[in-house]
Image (tube, rainbow, N blue to C red):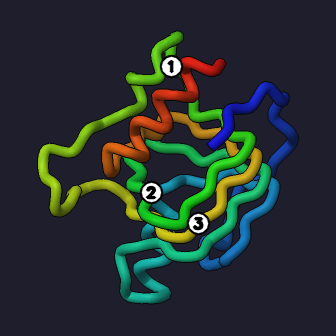
Amino acid sequence: MTLTNRKAAARTLATDYKQKTFKDKNLLLFEVFRANLEQTGEVTVKGVSFINCQIEGPAVMLPLSGCKFDDCNFGITHGDMRTLILYPASTERVTGAVPMLDCVFEAVDFFSVGFTGQKPFLDSMLEIESRA
């Protein structure tokens, strides 16, 4: 998982959310979730790639196994990455978050998105702060 120092590129608003690869798009995370649910009948978004996109909330993302983040800007932290982290109270499930499995996030800018999940993932996000 890496944090970016790059400048955001020009993007267009996504209109078709039923794709497996999004490139140079502005997306609403809830719309990705909704389109996936309509298309597959499943609540987990699986195997989708986001390249040079902006993913917007307000929303909470639950990255599961196989998700990769490279050259991403996780959003406004006011100098404290912990503002983006939501530790779940249950070890079994998280309601209200968008589960993502085997998804790729490359050169993605997040806006108003919180992150939850298992402690190792959340701890790895906190390590970004100490490296930046």
Which quadrant of the view contains residue 14?
bottom right
Residue 98 in view (yes/no): yes
Mark-to-mark CA distance, 3 and 2: 8 Å
N-terminal label among 1 and 2: 2
Please state the horizontal and vertical placement of residue 61, each as a whole percent of the image: 42, 51
Mark 3 falls on what kind of element? Answer: loop
Q: Is residue 90 left or right of residue 116?
A: left
> What's the mark number on residue 63?
2
Mark-to-mark CA distance, 1 and 3: 23 Å
Please state the horizontal and vertical placement of residue 64, each as a whole percent of the image: 42, 62
Residue 59 in view (yes/no): no
Mark 2 closeness class: few <14, some 14–19, many ≥20 residues within 10 Å: many
Mark 2 falls on what kind of element? Answer: strand
Which quadrant of the view contains residue 1?
top right
Residue type of the residue flagged with mark 1: Thr
Residue type of the residue flagged with mark 3: Cys
Q: Are marks 3 and 2 in contact (CB under 8 Å)?
A: yes
Residue at the image position 19 percent from the left and 61 percent from the top: 93
Residue at the image position 37 percent from the left and 87 percent from the top: 41
Residue type of the residue flagged with mark 2: Pro
Q: Which residue is mark 3?
A: 103
